[in-house]
Image: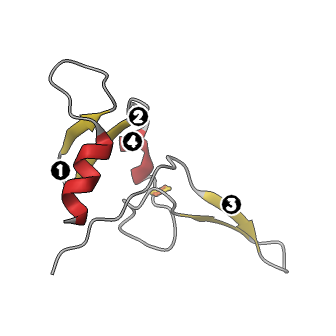
Amino acid sequence: MSRLVLHDRNRPYTIESSSGEKFAVCACGLSKNKPLCDGSHKRTLDEVSNSMYVYDENSRVKLASDGQGKGASPISTLLADFEK
Ligand code: FES
């Protein structure tokens, strides 16, 4: 089984425990040490807004953008295809 999960944040959430200890919680979806941030979000820092990317261990593919870029497909069309 596979699952496509959309994340649009490229930095962690910082939370603080009642004892004052601070934690960085992954919000990008790429950490190998979930729920904690391991710095993998740095791979997302050059993403272009209104675009969609797929990541694996070593690479990234830009799937689509909302009308930006040559040959790009609108994200809404791509998402509609996933919902079928
Ligand atoms: S926010 Fe996901 S690895 Fe840092």
Packing grade of label 3 (10 A; few <14, some 14-19, many >=20) is few
* Residue 12 is at least partly visible in this image: yes
Type of residue at label 1? Asn
Extreme residue in the top direction? 70
Packing grade of label 2 (10 A; few <14, some 14-19, many >=20) is few
How far separated are the C-alphas under marks 4 and 1?
Answer: 13 Å
How far separated are the C-alphas under marks 4 and 3?
Answer: 18 Å
Q: Reading the chain from its start, which is encountered first: label 4 or label 3?
A: 3
**Residue receiving disc 4:** 44
Quadrant for the N terminus in the image = bottom left
Type of residue at label 4? Thr
Q: Quarter-wise, where is residue 83 in the image?
A: bottom left
**Disc number for residue 14:** 3
Question: On screen, 34 above or below 41?
Answer: below
Type of residue at label 2? Asn
Colour option used: secondary structure
Report if the CB atoms under discs 2 and 1 are less than 8 Å apart. no
Question: On screen, 26 above or below 76?
Answer: below
